[in-house]
Amino acid sequence: MPSPRPLGPFTVQHVGLGCMNLSHAYGQPPSAEQAHTLLHAALDAGVTLFDTAALYGFGANERLVGPVLAPHRDRITLCSKGGMAGVAGEDGVLRRVIDGHPKTLRQNCEDSLRRLDTEVIDLYYLHRWDPRVPIEESVGEMARLKEEGKIRALGLSEVGVATLRRAHREHPIAALQSEYSLWSRNAELGTLAACRELGIAYVAFSPLGRAFLTGALQDVTSLVAGDIRAAMPRFAPAAYARNLQRLAPMQAIAQEAGCTLAELAIAWVLHQGEHIIALPGTTSVAHLHEDLRGGTVALNAQTLAALDALFPPEAIVGDRYGPQGQREVDTEKFPFEQR
């Protein structure tokens, strides 16, 4: 297995586990028993980075993973996120709300600690920057949580270079978590380089393109109710059909490299920099092991160049989020993306 990679004050394996889809986002989640089986398989396989959030299942994901991971806290890095969580309206229905005010972040953190059944969260992210609140105020409160021993390191998610630099001046940022894959390459507009310069780990979520890069999702009309991909422009049937045309050439590259599509996609992400950590998610033990094997695949310069040529950003049809989601992320966008 390749050498572990730094993540702030921690050292973790280069492929972690995003726990979101054990409770949230891609339709009907697995049973608690199935989720526990996956988590134990990840522990047995040597995964050391586990990532959850207050938003996932409106707290259900933290309640799910906390008891399973608790006996192993001395050998794993546990991450969660606040600043975007479920808030009950007057009708009692929980709705997603972005709120970066210090008081809210403190409450989010304390709620997460209770759900995770832990005294400290190793890496705590601001899930989305709330533009109503200066980033320095949000990060300043997170720094106070660190001083109080409630978290050990600070992270940000889906912010651009300017916001990242402002935050890092307020308090050192250990990690930036944002989407990065062959078909989502906004990180190359500046944040990858800024993280390298500042000594910040880049945690790449959705390195498999939300299953697109695995080849397993051929028919997006079959997405079940509640699957967030159904609202993403690049998963709209017409756009997706055009995007799928890139998978046959990618399969040929994978065959030449002696690996699967998923392994190739993970390997490509990790080859983009020693400061990058891949964070795939899955509900399948078989897919978990496939993702981890991707971290062992060595790609030569010719293969990397072929993949870059196959997936130029301007060739991908559809934005990665719908208009509302696009407005909620601070990451740099290509000129052809909606704003």
Image (cartoon, rainbow, N blue to C red):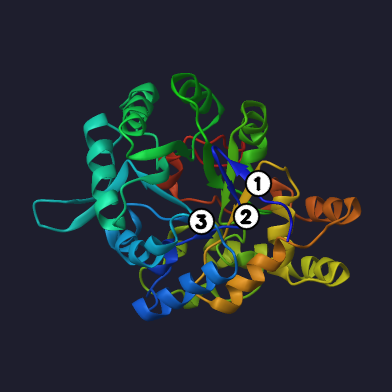
Q: How far across and how far down the image is residue 287, in percent?
A: 60, 74
Residue at 48% of width from left, 26% of height from top?
Answer: 163
Could you say which quadrant of the image residue 68 lies in?
bottom left
Q: How far across and how far down the image is residue 98, in percent?
A: 30, 41
As helix, strand or loop, the secondary structure at mark 2 comes to: loop
- In the picture, measured across the screen, residue 185 lies left or right of residue 51, that is right
Q: CB under 8 Å between callouts 1 and 3?
A: no
**Whether residue 297 is visible:** yes
Q: How far across and how far down the image is residue 104, in percent?
A: 23, 37
**Whether residue 218 is visible:** no
Q: Nearer the viewer, residue 111 or 84?
A: 111
- Mark nearer the N terminus (1 vs 3): 1
- In the picture, measured across the screen, residue 14 lies left or right of residue 27, that is right
Q: Quadrant of the N terminus?
A: bottom right
Q: Nearer the viewer, residue 318 or 81?
A: 81
Which residue in the protein does label 1 denote?
5
Q: CB under 8 Å between callouts 2 and 1?
A: yes
- Mark nearer the N terminus (2 vs 1): 1
Image: 39 above or below 80: below
- Mark nearer the N terminus (3 vs 2): 2
Residue at 52% of width from left, 35% of height from top?
Answer: 174
For the residues labelled 3 and 2, the Cα–Cα distance comes to 11 Å
- In the picture, measured across the screen, residue 170 lies left or right of residue 183, that is left
As helix, strand or loop, the secondary structure at mark 1 comes to: strand
Residue at 57% of width from left, 46% of height from top?
Answer: 203
Q: Which mark is residue 273?
A: none
Q: Residue furthest right?
A: 302
Which residue in the protein does label 2 denote?
13
Q: How far across and how far down the image is residue 278, in percent?
A: 61, 54
- Discs 3/2, front: 3
Inspect the image, locate mark 2, and give the three-letter code of the amino acid beneath it. Gln
